[in-house]
Amino acid sequence: MRSDPRNRLPEGRGIPIFDLPVAAVAAASDPLFEQLRKEDVVGPIHASPEYWLAGARSVISYFLPFSKEIKQAYSINTRLPPLEWVSGRLNGEIFNHVLRRALVIMLRRQGGRVVAPGLDPRYKAVNWLPMWSERHVGFIAGLGSFGLHGGLLTEKGTAGRIGSVITDLVFPPSERAYTEVYAYCPWKQERRCGVCINRCPVGAISKEVKNHSICIANGAEFIRPAFKDWGYHGCGHCQCNLPCSDHLPGRNGPAVGAVKGRKQGNGA
């Protein structure tokens, strides 16, 4: 993370894309993976760890927080995201692939069989619903809970990218300090905060839910054309300039059940 030159923007002075990550482990047999196949969570398209790797034992999930330089470049009063953000989103995912491959190599050297679903040729998404939702996997592993904006709230905030690998090596599962989907979201728990509602320039986030169709349309119709010369796209208003951008926004909410809630697309 510190030394690889691919963890830097190709434009300008080459600022870092990501700070140091946080990681967590889920048992491949965790019953919450089966719940992801429900229509009101991700959907039947979501594959189990066993689908990706026969004999899977552990799922390692990690969160890559965007650097402070990228987040500070994001003005609070503009509809368009900055070049630093859209470049970090695309080039950051390229580096995320680098990290996935590095983890695969490392674990194979330890004698394990390993698969990174994000790199697997079997992977696909249908109507923005993925065969392997990195955010939901992060929730199961204990990285964090969801926010009203649909992002994962981790100890290093919500502005970043997520990845995972599956292995037949056994690692102790991390503690999951919550059971409710929106445990760390103050708005969902107590109607406190709600900053992301007004941060969205196209009204995709209501007081109850995020409308991913509106969000995606804004990216295709407004943001992508603005950055077509670079091939970049992707808004980050609901990840930056928020109380949860850099760290958890507040106390843990009450434990009220297992995984349930509206569908989440590929998203951030």
Image (cartoon, helix red, strand yellow):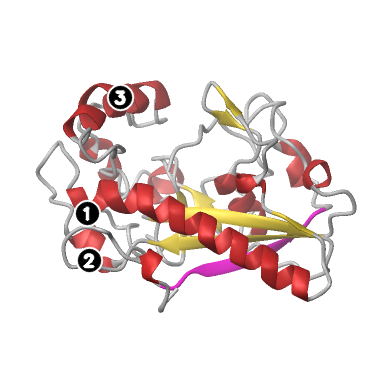
* 242 on left or right of 53: left
The quarter of the image holding the N terminus is: bottom left
Looking at the picture, which amino acid does disc 3 mark?
Answer: Ala
How far apart are the two marked residues, 2 and 1, measured between alpha carbons? 8 Å
* Residue located beneath label 1 in the image: 84
* Residue located beneath label 3 in the image: 220
| Magenta stretch in the rendered image | 20-28
Query: Which callout, 3 or 1, points at the residue further toward the start of the chain?
Result: 1
Quarter of the image where one finds residue 228? top left
How far apart are the two marked residues, 3 and 1, measured between alpha carbons? 19 Å
The quarter of the image holding the C terminus is: top left
Q: Secondary structure at mark 2?
A: helix
Q: Secondary structure at mark 3?
A: helix
Looking at the picture, which amino acid does disc 2 mark?
Answer: Glu
Q: Is residue 25 magenta?
A: yes
* Residue located beneath label 2 in the image: 69
